[in-house]
Amino acid sequence: MLLAELKALNALPGWEEADRFLDPEDAAERIRRAAAARPGLMRCVRLGESEEGRPIDGVSLGRGDRHVSLVAGNHPDEPVGPDFLRRFVIAISERPDAHGPLLGAFRFFIVPHTNPDGENRNRAWRTAWNESGDGTEAMATAYLRHAMREPPGRDMEFGFPDMRPENRAVAAWLRKEGPFALHGSLHGMGISGGALLLIEKHWGYRAARLQARFLEAAQAEGLPLYDRNRQGEKGFFYLAPGFWTTPEAPAMRAFFEARGDRETAALFRSSSMEYARSLGGDPLCYVTELPLFLAKGLSPASGSQQIIAQLRLRLAQNDGADDGDIRRDIDRLGLRPLPLASALRMHLRTLSAALEQLSAE
């Protein structure tokens, strides 16, 4: 019955026409109201505050013995993961009776956004995206000009358990509720030639079902897989086209130390995946990497990365950059936004596949 429920999960209603990111404050209020109405099934927990005093909320959902942690926002310029988690919580909480086997087998511990300060700093281009309709040029220009991500030493994904107040708040909750059977850290890529799924090394070759389902989901969306072999750089080991292992802090440190940059190397702490495993058990850990913009034929050897760097530099140096030059670069890259509804379905099918993989063990 659970496997049938997991397949049905892929058809959660209301996402087919999603084309705008949810308003974070409105979504948070909807989640709080849902939790208040279903105290036996769902709790909304104030985990702490960000450096600038914004609330960090966690949501527990379900009654099952197998605990699942899902976090998003560690990189604040990757908004689809947080949007998915908000929609997932709202959709399940609105029809809990329809998901009885799922909520009876698993208990979800979800942090829709770990980094509300970073989310606020990226608000300008998300708003422009929402208002752009399907205008690729306007979307890409807003993103490339205004997207903000944090460097090592501020990067929350490699800041567990205590680099920042946000890390401490999330880590304390996970420590209390662990160990976990599954941990998902939802990420994204600004511009990429396709989708990528990272699987923690202890599960890399055990997760054939997850890989097969991810491939099926990508094919259903007409989304290619990104194929590059980084040969273990930063802990990224190649599993198959579109699949790598998750990065690891020791490998990150070794990468920078090999370049004589000990200062940067020292900034890396544990990733959320490493932290989840430190809590015990044998959790299946995965990281979704879905592009905001697809670039036709993007590969390490294509020269596209240099075009992207030049475009970013042009926009950063001159807000009045020539529209013709911007349009030409966008055309050279063959950029098109990945529809939000497609990205949301990919996240949902990946989560469903990971739960199916666990259920098959």
Image: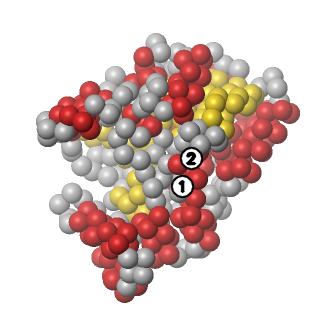
Residue 314: x percent and y percent? 33, 74
The residue identified by callout 1 is 121
- Three-letter amino acid code of the residue under disc 2: Asp
Q: Quadrant of residue 304?
A: bottom left
Closer to us: 93 or 309: 309
- Secondary structure category for the residue under label 2: helix
Q: Is residue 148 left or right of residue 93?
A: left
Is 262 displayed left or right of 96 in the figure?
left
| Residue 18: x %, y % from top left | 64, 60
Q: Residue at x 66, y 38 (%)?
A: 55
- Category of crowding for the residue at label 2, using alpha-carbon neighbours closer than 10 angstroms: few (below 14), some (14–19), many (at least 20): some
Q: Position of residue 320 (x, y in %)?
A: 42, 81
Answer yes or no: is residue 262 visible: yes
Q: Residue at x 54, y 42 (%)?
A: 115
**Residue 310 in which image quadrant:** bottom left
Q: Quadrant of the N terminus?
A: top right
What whole-number distance in Å separates the C-alpha atoms at marks 2 and 1? 6 Å
Q: Secondary structure at mark 1?
A: helix
Residue in the image at 72% along x and 44% along y: 28
Residue carrying label 2: 117
